[in-house]
Amino acid sequence: MNTILVVDDDQDILKLESFNLSANGYKTLSAENGKEALQVLSSEQVDAIILDIMMPIMDGLETIKEIRYGLHSNIPIIVASAKGDESDIVMALELGSDDYLTKPFSMKVMLSKVKAVLRRMQNAKEAVDIVRINELMMDVQKHTCTVHDIPVELTATEFSLLYLLASNKEQVFTRAQIINKVKGSDYPVTDRSIDVQIATLRKKLGDEGNYIKTIWGIGYTFKES
């Protein structure tokens, strides 16, 4: 069952959207502003977000920025707003929303948008089950890694860490984000242990390990050049 986070400061709209989603087989979570939405995301697994723009405390545009540059950058976001000017739509899409609904809209249209973004996300997940970058190949289903077609023995943590970086090329991850994504926020791993695992990965991968770049003062990224 997919979980949808509905974010809107209008209680009537919040209840209406949540009711229709629940009636169509989705689990729903709710928040009344961007700050509450980020709190929900920090503790719950969410598959898609329906997000209003004009909200108190933290509006929708700022919320999109926080999500896209944070730990939940891949969650699909559908903006649902009364702001229907072309400039408003373009701005939301450029910031990273996946689709845009102008209020008022029918619940059937909303449900079709949700179904579409979830389908695209599922297709994207299936597409990255195998990661190929030059001579490096990772097969998630088989949990194998090869360099120049030679198997590389990786621990479960090393495999997860490499997959995180290699499947999100050019994206910079802080050490805290790596820990959260690889082990979970409550796992007792230190920043130093991440540095050690990165060093071990580079050694095991040989020349391909040079693609793992240190971003001083921030963390790590995966770049081919």
Image (spheres, rainbow, N blue to C red):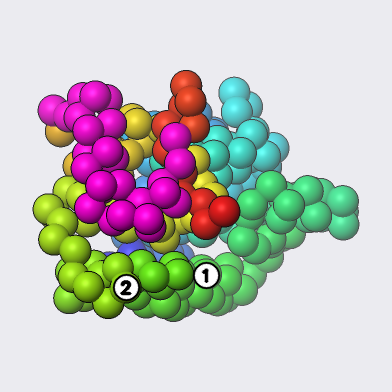
Image: magenta residue range: 188-214
User: Which residue lies at the image location 61% right of the left edge and 61% below the top edge?
Assistant: 98
From the viewer's perspective, tell me whether residue 22 is left or right of residue 12: left
Q: Amino acid at mark 2?
A: His
Q: Quadrant of the N terminus?
A: bottom left
Q: Position of residue 69 (x, y in %)?
A: 54, 39
Q: From the viewer's perspective, is residue 199 above or below residue 76?
A: above
The residue carrying mark 1 is 117
Figure quadrant of residue 167: bottom left
SS for callout 1:
helix
The residue carrying mark 2 is 148
Instruction: Judge the density around disc 1: few (<14), some (14-19), many (≥20) Cα neighbours within 10 Å.
Output: many
Residue 89 or residue 32, whichever sits in front:
89
Secondary structure mostly taken by the magenta-highlighted segment of the chain = helix
Q: What residue occupies the far right of the structure in this picture?
A: 86
Look at the image and tell me whether residue 138 can be seen.
Answer: no
Q: From the viewer's perspective, is residue 146 above or below residue 5?
A: below
